[in-house]
Image (cartoon, rainbow, N blue to C red):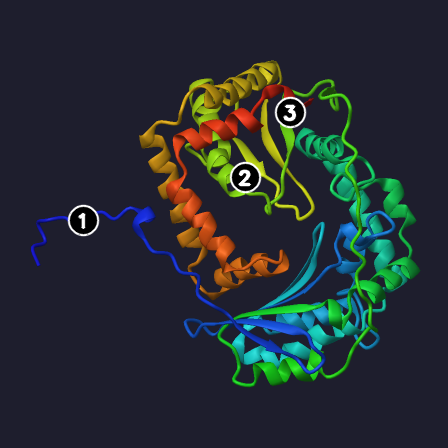
Amino acid sequence: MNRTIAPPIKDAVDFDIKLKPYEQFKLDNGIPVYVMKSDEQETLQLELVFPAGSWYESESLEAAATNFLMKNGTSTHTAQEINESVDYHGAYLNRNAYHENATYTLHCLTKHTEVLLPILQEVILDPIFPEEELSLYKQNQKQKLAVNLLKCDFVGNRFIDKYLFGDFHPYGRVSTMMAYDALQTEGLKAFYKKHYTYNNCKIFVAGNQPANMIALLNKYFGSTPWNGEAHLVKLDLPIQPAEEKKFRIFNDENGVQGAVRIARHFPNRYHPDFPKMLVLNTIFGGYFGSRLMSNIREEKGYTYGIYSQLYNFRQTSALNIQTEAGRDVCEATIGEVYKELVRLQEEPVPKEELDLVRNYMIGSILGDLDGAFQLIQRWKNLILNDLDENYFYNNIQTIKTITAEELQHLAKQYFTPGDFYELVVI
C-alpha cells in the first residue's frame, strides 16, 4: 500500500443501498411484532404503536391527553412510583401522540427488560386516569399554551395549518384554553378503551434482545385479547381550506421579528410526484446549502435559517416554507422566496448542483440506516403506511435518475406563487 496516494473518492450515489430485512412474529392474540436484531450494544428499544392520534378523537385534545395520562397512574402504582421504577433502572419510557398514531417507547439496557416489561404492561393495560393528574395536566398545558401564544413562530405554525386544512380538520385543529378545560376523565377512558386495544396494536423491537423476548411479549401483551375487539372506522374528513390566501397578523405590536409561512397543498406520499418532489424540495429549501438558504440567509442576511418541507401526513400533504425574519424584512423575504420558485420554473437545475443534492440525499439515507434503532424506524414508517421495501428502493432510484428537465416540469406544476398561502405573524 502506497500511503502517499489518496484512495479514490466514491460518491454516495454509487453505493448499492440495501434495506436490511426485519423478522416478524405474531403473539398468541395476533399482535404483530417486527424485530430488528443487533448485538453491538446491550440496549433495547421496544415501541408499541396504536392508531390513536388526533384523527380519531371526537373531542379536541383527547388523543394527546389520553396518551400522556396513561403513564400517570395505574390501579397499583402512582405516577411517581412508575417514574421512579423506570429511572432506577436507567431506562426511559416515552409517549407521543401524532395525527394518525400514538406510541409508547421503552429504551433500556437489555438486562433490565424482564423487570421493566411488567411496568410497561401496567401503563398500557391498566391506566386509571386519576382526577388529580388530569387537573395538573390541564393546568400545565394551559400555562405552556399561554407562554407559546406570545411567540410569533408558534402562532404562525397554528394559523398556517388552519388555513390549509380548516379549523375542524385534525390537521388544522389547534389547542385552546377552552378545549383543555373541557377534558373529562370519562372521555379519556372511553377513548382509551376504543383505541388502545390488542387488535389495534403493533410492536416494533430493535437492539440486543433477551433470548426469550417473544415469550416475554406473549406473557405481558399476547396472552389475552385485552380491551375488547375495537375496530377502527376509516373516517372521510374533507379539508376546508381558507378562501383568502394572504394574511398578516400582529400578535405583538412591539415585536421586532416576524414568522413567515408560505405553504400550499400537495399530494400525499402515495402520489407518483411525491418522491420527485423530495428532490426538488431539497434543492429549493430542504438542506443547509439550498437555494433559499443561499439567497435569503447568505446573500441577503434576512434570517438565520429558512427551510421548506413536505408534510408526511397519511391522508394528504402540504409544502411549507418557514422562517423567522426581522420585522422590516418580512415582505422582502416573501419576495425572494417567490423569485426562487419562479427561477426553478424558468431555469433547469445545473448538473453540478443536482449531483451535489443527489449525494447529499443518498448520504442522509445511509446515515439513517446506521444501526438497528434507525432501521426499525425506517421499516415502521413503511409498515404503518401500508408500504413495502419497493417504495424505499423506488425513492432511491428517483434520487439517482431524476433529470433537470423533470424537475423543471415539476416546478412549473407545483411552484406557481399564486397557489401558495402566505402568512406573516409579528
Across and down, in percent, residue 168 comes to 83, 39
Amino acid tagged 1: Pro
Residue 163 shows up from this direction: yes
Across and down, in percent, residue 348 comes to 40, 24
Q: Which residue is mark 2?
A: 273
Amino acid tagged 2: Asp
**Front of the two marks 1 and 3:** 3
Residue 357 quadrant: top left
- Mark 3 surroundings within 10 Å by alpha-carbon count, few (fewer than 14), some (14 through 19), many (20 or more): many
Amino acid tagged 3: Phe
Label of residue 83 in the image: none
**Front of the two marks 2 and 3:** 2
Across and down, in percent, residue 244 comes to 76, 21
User: How many numbered circles are shown?
Assistant: 3
Label of residue 420 in the image: 3
Q: Which residue is mark 1?
A: 8
Closer to us: 55 or 141: 55
